[in-house]
Image (spheres, grey):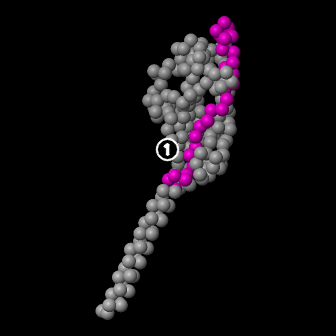
């Protein structure tokens, strides 16, 4: 083998190594972009109506009170996603009795509309919940916590099913700002999770 053949052979070998390196870099970049440029759906509570008569309830406790929660699912990611399923529930509980894992009961398959969320897009929705009068009085007296919790599933760009769980709590009427929603993220860690 001549010197020029050896140099051509060595150069060809280096080109193969560089090409293999480029393929590996491209593959890692592809995996990275799928992981971090996917959709991220978050829950945003926007308004709560029906809790304005708190002082009257102390004097004349109602049988039940209908509360309307206006909320949105927001796509904070960089790709389009389609919401698949979900639910949202309300309760008045003693915080010490909340189980570590949420229980959503029997799910209404028709509750979640077929919604396509674009990046930075949102879908505003409403849910009504009837709180029993004695539960609201417990909440007003500081013996209970109003809880709004649920989840939504959605598909990401790689075809993987993702889930966002959320739990909002309102500890007492003292937490209720004028004109605000008065609810904050709370509950056990399993209630607030994104996969």
x, y percentage for residue 186?
A: 51, 28
For the magenta stretch, what is the residue range? 34-61
Nearer-the-camera pick, 42 or 137: 42
Image height check: is 100 above or below 122?
above
- Find out whether residue 53 is within the magenta segment: yes
Q: Residues within 10 Å of mark 1 (few under 14, many from 20)?
A: few
The quarter holding residue 173 reads top right
Is any atom of residue 147 visible in this view? no
Is any atom of residue 192 visible in this view? yes
Count how many numbered circles sit on residues in the image.
Answer: 1
- Find out whether residue 186 is within the magenta segment: no
Q: Residue at x 52, y 46 (%)?
A: 162
Image height check: is 78 above or below 111?
below
Q: Residue at x 59, y 26 (%)?
A: 183
Q: In the image as oriented, which residue stretches furthest toward the bottom?
A: 2
Q: In the image as oriented, which residue stretches furthest toward the top?
A: 59
x, y percentage for residue 142?
A: 54, 14
x, y percentage for residue 136?
A: 60, 16
The quarter holding residue 12 reads bottom left
Q: What secondary structure is found at the residue carrying circle 1?
A: loop
Image height check: is 66 above or below 17?
above
Q: Residue at x 56, y 12 (%)?
A: 141
- Quarter holding the N terminus is bottom left
Nearer-the-camera pick, 181 or 147: 181
Q: Which residue is mark 1?
A: 195
Q: Residue at x 66, y 14 (%)?
A: 54
x, y percentage for residue 178?
A: 67, 21
Image height check: is 167 above or below 7?
above
């Amino acid at each position: 083998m001549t010197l020029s053949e050896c140099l051509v052979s060595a150069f060809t070998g280096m080109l193969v190594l560089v090409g293999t390196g480029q393929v590996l870099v491209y593959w890692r970049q592809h995996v990275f972009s799928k992981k971090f440029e996917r959709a991220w759906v978050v829950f945003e509570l926007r308004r709560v109506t029906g809790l304005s008569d708190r002082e009257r309830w102390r004097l004349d406790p109602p049988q039940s009170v209908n509360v309307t929660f206006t909320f949105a699912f927001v796509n904070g990611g960089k790709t389009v996603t389609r919401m698949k399923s979900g639910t949202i529930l309300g309760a008045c509980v003693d915080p010490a009795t909340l189980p570590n894992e949420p229980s959503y009961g029997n799910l209404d398959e028709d509750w979640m509309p077929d919604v396509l969320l674009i990046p930075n897009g949102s879908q505003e929705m409403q849910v009504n919940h009837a709180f029993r009068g004695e539960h609201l009085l417990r909440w007003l007296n500081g013996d209970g916590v109003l809880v709004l919790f649920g989840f939504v599933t959605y598909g990401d760009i790689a075809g993987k099913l993702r889930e966002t769980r959320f739990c909002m709590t309102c500890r007492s009427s003292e937490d209720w700002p004028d004109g605000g929603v008065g609810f904050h993220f709370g509950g056990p860690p399993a209630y607030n999770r994104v996969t």
